[in-house]
Image: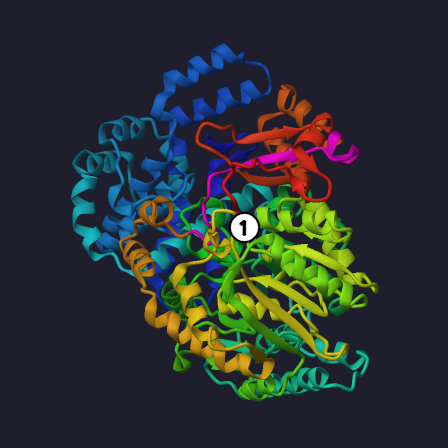
Amino acid sequence: MYQCKSHPDKFLVDHLFHVRNIGLNLFNAMNYGEDSTITKGLEIALLFHDFGKASTYFQEYLRINIGYENNTIGSKEFLQKQHDLGNRKQHGPISAVYCYYLLSRKFHFDEKLSYLFFFVVKRHHSNLQNAGEEVIYEDELIEIAKTIIFDDIQFLLSEIKIADTIEEFITFLENFRLNRIIRKVRKEFTINDYFLVNLLFSIIVRADKADCIIGDNYRPVTNDTLSSGIVDEFKKNLPFIDNTIFSIRNSAYTEVNESIHNITNEKIFSINLPTGAGKTLIAINAALKLKNKTPGIDRIIYCLPFTSVIDQTGDICRNQLFKTDNSDIVLLHHHLVEFEYKCNNFEYDDFQSEFLITNWDSEFIITTFYQFLHSILTHLNKNVRKLVSLNNAVIIMDEVQTIPQKYWKLINNVFTFISNVYNIRFILVTATLPLLFRPDEITELAPLKEKYFTSLNRIILNVTHITNPIGLEEFVDNIIKQVKSNPEKSILIILNTIKSSIKVYTLLKENGIESLYLSTNIIPKERFDRIDKVKKSKKRMIVVSTQLVEAGVDIDFDIVYRDFAPLDAIFQTCGRCNRNSVKGKGIVYIFLLEDNNHRKYCSYVYDIVNRSKTLDILKSKSIIEEKDFYLLSIEYYNAIAELKGDSDSDFLLKELSGLNYKNAFTSGKCFQLIEAIPKATAFIAVDTEAEILWNKFQELMVNTKIQRYEKKMQIRKLLRKMGNYMISIRKLPDEKNFYYVSPGQLEMEYNQETGFILDNNATDCFF
């Protein structure tokens, strides 16, 4: 009955009907609003996003690809035929124009909305670019249109009860001038259009891929498996500890419960509690209660700043709270997670698992700030797909203070908008709440927080050394004295850069003091093992680390030494000292460290405004008690907000409002949660498993017998496993992007204790 194929094993008409059904199901589940115009426009875009595949040029392109994959067409013939087809095989531009034609001429949409649908359809196989700079070649499109097998298209048109002919469309094309439309509509773009385009793009791309990978019966997960009282039951079995911090945990838990019960229409919340006050359990409980209380909410997304703490939180959720390894209930997603989606013993293949994991098809997702924020603020096709899953969600932002100040205004605007339009509830969790929102814009779920902060007396902060810079040798001398005078005390030493951390570790070792080293200079596999060892150790430990242990890593030491840093980082460091208040009083020492050129190590990492304001606040003090941290934190954030401007946020908001995706996400001032420092990747073959992975990778790269898509999938899967042996290193412009450190090179390139051996002349880096 049908003539055209969309894919080797699928008829075009079937595919387009399936995509329409999947996409509308996704959209209707969002409670987006009552705007029937958007619904109709989306239906047209879904039904005709592959209109151009009905051309004989595309059908020929598909035929020769099948022949090449099946080895019935040789590579020389394949390349020649591809060359002969040229751009005429492309289906995106003509599909976009046909959607514009239907919406503007048959359904009488205004020019701007018709153009927005044109834009998302044209880009559905690529990344989003500046919407005001799209280009098409009308003569080329007319040539393609003349080959459209319109009998298949008539099946789609009859579904929407529209009469049309290919001749009528060609006449339209002959008079179509995209540049004239763009000149008019780009003046009307707003920030609302940015979020609408992203939502439409997300639905179209996800529905398109879902039909190809899962099938036409795909439905996003909308479980209601997790009981709102599951944390209440878990807490009943926790051991009782008779101390202040345990009392605070219980009081804060109860208070947040009551706050959730009393909320009405609020959408953005905070849980601002001291370190060690049980914020993880409190936040999960609050999210479950919100999910149960709020109509339409069907999932929880728990975001953390670093991958190093995701497994920790995942273990709590999977093995202790929810007691399930079903991916449709609890899902972990970061760049190292393997593509294995489990659901009631049903086996998903690699492509299906990758699709479901990267699209967050689960009731409770644990992921990184990077994955979450780059789903909203992005131009990348693969990232925008997740946007559908943000709708109807409670989103926990744990350790929210790690978001750079330059993006505070941007985050405020974005969170405020999407919480209203996408039916989202945000819970910002931290011990040091930044001024992302004014007090009247956010609801604190622990309103007695000041009482909790001021009642604690677990540690003292010694800042007597912050005005006189010293070198690493003198710093280590201070530590050695502490080690010898307190033989039972565990000690954590946090440095600002990898080089300084390695130097301190080496100096301690030269003085007969054994310690454990932590930084991103060691491979992830070893790093996670060492963090786990620290958490489980019952013996005294001395650990030398960079800042990677500051946020969210549940470790506890008696004494902490730290290189100077902004106040919020210092307070996070304090959270690694005497967390459970079971060892008397802990102490945190802050020193101002400098290198041999008298440059402060903190200047390699932190902004001068944050550093100078911290120094202004602390320089007149010597010993600070924990009960004073809260008010000092407020003073610090107020000062930072006054001194630092919003130029980066203003730039991005302007570009988003103009739908300038390329400017916002690829330019010099583009949004980047992680600073884009030129880096190379080094694969370190430290053990037999690493060697096996490397050999498999080499074999796979030269294997010509595997089909192209299967080969790409196998490479992606293997690279995720290899990621446990990969580290990022700084690179110069003329250096290569990838290094393999073989077992024979380990002695010269990789130290088993401190990681990659840095060139003495290399630029220092942090973490």
Residue stretch rendered in magenta on the structure: 672-691
Is residue 677 found inside the magenta-colored segment of the image?
A: yes
Inspect this view and state whether residue 326 appears: no
Residue at x 60% of width, y 30% of height: 739
Q: How far from the left and from the top, in percent, is residue 179?
A: 19, 41
Q: Quadrant of residue 148?
A: top left
Q: Is residue 79 visible?
A: yes
Q: Is residue 246 above or below residue 79?
A: below
Q: Is residue 692 magenta?
A: no
Vertical placement of 523 versus 697: above or below?
below
Q: Is residue 662 above or below residue 79?
A: below
Q: Which residue in the protein does label 1 denote?
A: 766
Camera-nearest residue between 476 and 543: 476
Residue at (62% x, 31% y) in the render = 710
Q: Is residue 524 left or right of residue 421?
A: right
The type of residue carrying mark 1 is Phe
